[in-house]
Structures are given as structure tokens and as C-alpha cells.
Amino acid sequence: MKVNCKTRRKGFTISEVLMVVVIIGLITGAGAGLYVGTFRKMQVEKAAYDFFLTAKYARLIAVEKQSQYKMELDLTNKEFYLTTVLWDEDSGQAQQEIVKNIYCKPVQFQGDVVFESVEIMPNDLETNSISEEQQTITFSPNGTAQSSVVQIGDGKTHYSISISPATGRVKMYFGTTENVKVGTTDLDAE
């Protein structure tokens, strides 16, 4: 009688199972790190895009309503909102009111997103009381605005928004404000 020494085993050893668990853990950890980085970039992009759209809306509504609109930047609370002065017929006085509608609402930054740099040039008609905590960008009924460059970011990702004084045109750039010029206007550029 012959004894067969070659027996086929079925299943996995404990070391093989542990190796698979370690590989899955490494892949999951790398994926989670990429997700967190992408999520933070998306928070910065959303904040910058909201600022960009609010500034465009401010110029449009100022011309349409023939009234001055102001973008108020609250640097301490990491938020911005659009205001205007409306006449209250009941009291017979003008009141400043925050604009809230389907196109525009107050925005507060999420996560680590902050105003990294704010550069607003005062216009000749009004003295802009610039403080460390609160800044204002004024949009006039004739389509002009205060020359401004605002950088929004989280320390790693940065977006810069510039507002042209002569046309009130708003542009958004990826990156810091170093290459964005304040106070210059090229009326022939598209």
C-alpha cells in the first residue's frame, strides 16, 4: 500500500490573510487622504466661486436698479454679503438692508477657508472706512466699482478675484494675488 505524501490543501494561511488585510488598509488610507485633500480644494473653489458670482450680481443689480450696492466682507467671521439702501415708506427713512433672494444670499466660508488677502482701493466719491475686520466693495449705478483684489484660500489652495474699477468687471484666477494688478484697466481687452 502506497501513501500519497502530496496532499492538496484548501484555504489560506493566516499570513496570507494578514497580507491581504494590510494591502487593503494601505489602499484605503491613501484613498481617504486623496478624498480629504480634494474636499478641501472644493471648499476653497466653492467659496471663491460664490464670491465671484455675488460680485457679478452686485454690478448687474446696481445698474438695473440704478442704486448703489455694497459687498460687505466680514474678515473675522469669514463671511460676505451684499447690502443696499432702501427707502422705508412707513418710517420715511432710508435703511440699509442685506440682499437675500434666489440669486444672492450671505455666504459664510466652511472649514479652513479664509480671506487671505483683501486689497480695496477707495474711490474718489466716498471714503471707505477700511478696518481690519470689515471691508466694503462699492458697486455704482453707472457700472463702475471700487478697484479690488481678494484672495480666498486655505493655506494650500488659493483663488484670486479682481474687480475692475472702470467697468466693474469681475475675474477669477486660480492662484495668489501676486500676478493680479490692482487699479489698471484695459478697455480694449476682452
Image: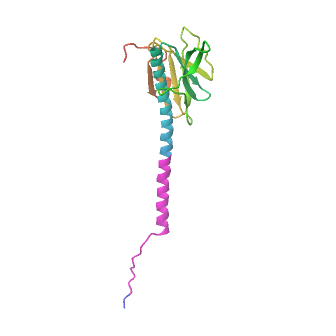
Residue furthest to the bottom in view is: 1
Q: Position of residue 64 (x, y in %)?
A: 45, 15
Q: How many marks?
A: 0
Front position in the image: 178 or 59:
59
For the residue pair 38 and 73, the one nearer the viewer reads as: 73
Q: Could you say where residue 84 lies in the image, as x and y percent from the top left? A: 54, 18
Instruction: Tell me if I can see residue 97 in this picture.
Output: yes
98, above or below 36, in the image: above
Classify the position of the C terminus by image quarter. Answer: top left
Is residue 9 on the magenta stretch? yes
- Viewer-closest of 99 and 87: 87
Residue 44 position, x and y percent, is: 50, 33
Q: Quadrant of the N terminus?
A: bottom left
The residue lying at 37 percent from left, 13 percent from top is 188
Where residue 105 appears, as percent x and y from the top left, is 52, 27
Q: How is the image coloured?
A: rainbow
Residue 180 visible, this angle: no
Magenta-highlighted residues: 3-32
Is residue 89 part of the magenta span, yes or no? no
- At x 62% / y 23%, what residue is drawn? 133
| 74 sits to left or right of 178 | right
**Residue ranking furthest to the front:** 90
Question: Most prominent secondary structure in the magenta stretch?
Answer: helix
